[in-house]
Image: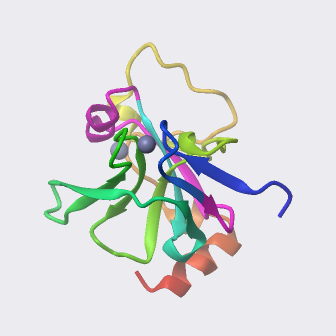
Amino acid sequence: MAKPLTGRCFCGAVKYQLTAKPMFVNCCHCTDCQRQTSSAFAINGVIEERHVKLVKGKPVAISMKTDSGHPHDIYRCGECQTALWSDYGRRKAIRFVRVATLDNPLPPQAHIFTRSKLPWVTLPKGVPVFKVYYNMEKLWPAASLKRRAALGV
Ligand SMILES: [Zn+2]
Ligand SMILES: [Zn+2]
């Protein structure tokens, strides 16, 4: 790997490194992400938990209710409360890393839930856009699908 994928919270109490590139990076415009980030969208890198290495400190999990009934745990720095990653449905093996906390944030590979996209956000050409979600088999690279399947989640 060329550049180490290092990241941290705002205050620096929690530092981490991704030991692989995320399988896929989604930019989510759903209303939950908007409210939880108090912003226009969340950018999530989907990655195996074992590839998220804590370098310093340890984030705390805050549990969110979801429509599906499966809890959504957001891992935040206990000091500055920056959200670092999520565990949707307590699947443990898979993390949704907030890639904007990386020192070199990765660009999204798809825009999802654009049905609730804020009207003043203009999306770039060349990145697929979905009103809700997409068919993973069709969009994800084969190598990423293989990694995802190996997790069995
Ligand atoms: Zn912090
Ligand atoms: Zn969302």
Q: Which residues are magenta?
A: 17-40
Up-down: is 84 above or below 20? above
Q: Which residue shows up at 38% across the image and 27% down it?
A: 117
Q: Is residue 29 magenta?
A: yes
Q: Which residue shows up at 27% across the image and 68% down it?
A: 89
Left or right for 135, reference 35: right
Q: Kindly indicate the quadrant of the structure image that contains residue 150.
A: bottom right
Q: Is residue 14 magenta?
A: no
Q: Which residue shows up at 63% across the image and 62% down it?
A: 18
Image location (x, y in percent) of residue 44? 49, 49
Q: Kindly indicate the quadrant of the structure image that contains residue 140.
A: bottom right
Q: Quadrant of the N terminus?
A: bottom right
Q: Which residue shows up at 37% across the image and 75% down it?
A: 92
Image location (x, y in percent) of residue 3? 81, 54
Left or right for 69, reference 39: left
Count how many numbered circles sit on residues in the image.
Answer: 0
Residue farthest top in this picture: 120
Image location (x, y in percent) of residue 70? 19, 66
